[in-house]
Image: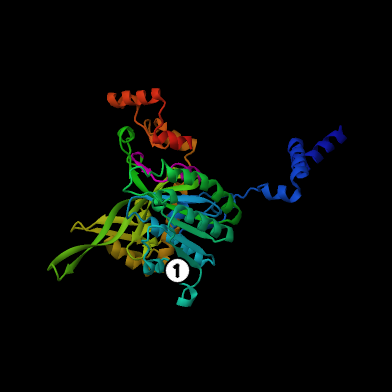
Amino acid sequence: MGELIHTKRNNQMAAPKLHPKLESFYKLMTKKMGQESVDSIVVKPSFKLKHISTGSTILNMLIGGSRLPNGSFICPGWPKGRIIEVYGQEGSGKSTIAMMGMGEAIRSGGTGLYVDLEHAVVDTYAMKLGCDFRPPEMGGSGAAIRVSPSTAEETQVIVNAAAIAGVDFIVIDSVAAMVPRAQAKVDPLDESDKAGLAVLPRFMSNWMPMLQSIIAKTGTIVIFLNQTRDKIGREAMMAFTEEAKKSTTGGNALKFYSSIRMMLKPKQKTKAKKWNPLIKDYQEVPIATDVQVLNVKNKIDALQGHNSIVTIRYGVGIDELRSMLNVSTAYDIVKMTKNAKRQEVYSFTSPTTGKVIEQISIEKFRSALSKDKVMLDEMISLCQSKLVSEFRAIDDSEIDALEENAVTTVNHDADDDMMPFETQEFDAEAEDTDNQSDESGSLSVDDLINED
């Protein structure tokens, strides 16, 4: 009996071994492919992903702000070796967020490639964000290059070559501006000369798996910037959220291969009244824009659907301090009251020293707080703790504590939020047309894209 107990203890303490079935599979693959090939394709788990900071604490926490058992974050920044899509309406800060990430990569000793298909980059602004595209002979750092290819095929060759060479950070600005060669050769005056249907979606479907395979080995970050389009017809009628009424260009391949999809939406602007001697009156000059960032898709951390606000200051980029002030006022870390003149008064009390900073208007409070580094660091630390607690998946205990009607079920079709079936109003004539089309066996554009 004593020997049996001793044997069981030894078995419990023995190191775990590969399952016999997997061991047999491993031997068979080694025999067919060779040891080096098998070792190159077997993936070892990595719970803390390699990353490059976004330049914003809020964006870092929104991407991978969950903590591991050792206290470190899963991925506080853009994940290496992944495809990312950042999209939104015009003036929402897409290029700024992408350039700030590239600037962080360059500051950490990396390299960057900016594919400027829209020909809209301002080099002086790019330099403020850390992206110096000047060659060394012009005084540049030689760590970043900006290119402007003519066709989508040229873009593919350039991006693939840069990824194979190990460039750390690549930005494609934008998908909507990529013109396939077949489409570029079309004569607009010749009605018989047509490029065909869904040329760009087909191109992206062929390119995305190839690109993902390359960057997974080199660790290159590839960010695609994309524009939004308004849906028309029944799709727009059936959508009941603003997001569902929008679509992105380039088909569905980018949606599938992106590990992160972020949608940007301007919420409000901060303006200052300034005397203009030309018009002999005061004018409101924009200072900054608060942009809502929505995690449409996140395969890095369980933060899909979470959103937050970042402040983009004109000519500066993401205003880290102002963004954190938005967080601090939302969670009552910085107190906001109104005085007798109905002016907003902001105040922060140091939790360690008891020192108080108080100013009228958030911009003056921001300026005063930026001059006291100790209190600034204390406020940012408190904000970061709040962000970590908020940007996480909802567990069962939290669901139980919610109100009765807080959890709802909504019909979901692909990427679109759909209205309940009872509230949908279909156009009878359009429905009959669809039925006739189905009976005749003709294919629509959507059918061709889905078939691809």
Percent across and percent down for residue 316 are 36, 65
The mark total stands at 1
Image quadrant of residue 279?
A: bottom left
Q: Nearer the viewer, residue 422 or 309?
A: 422
Q: Is residue 245 rendered magenta in the image?
A: yes
- Determine if the magenta segment contains residue 340: no
What x and y, as percent, mark residue 144?
48, 66
Q: Is residue 294 left or right of residue 111?
A: left
Asked which colour scheme the image uses, the reply is rainbow
Q: Position of residue 268 (x, y in %)?
A: 28, 53
Q: Quadrant of residue 14?
A: top right
Q: Residues within 10 Å of mark 1 (few under 14, many from 20)?
A: many
Q: Is residue 185 visible?
A: yes
Q: Nearer the viewer, residue 146 or 371?
A: 146
- Residue 29 at x, y percent in the picture: 74, 42
Residue type of the residue flagged with mark 1: Phe
- The residue lying at 39 percent from left, 61 percent from top is 320
| Res 48 seen here | no
Up-down relation of residue 154 to residue 260 (above or below): below
Q: What residue is disc 1 on? A: 133
Image: 125 above or below 43: below
Query: Residue at point 44% right, 35% down?
Result: 448
Q: Which quarter of the rendered picture does the N terminus lie within?
A: top right
* Residues shaded magenta: 244-257
Q: Secondary structure at mark 1?
A: loop
In the rendered image, the residue lying farthest to the left is 280
Which is nearer the eye, 350 or 55?
A: 55
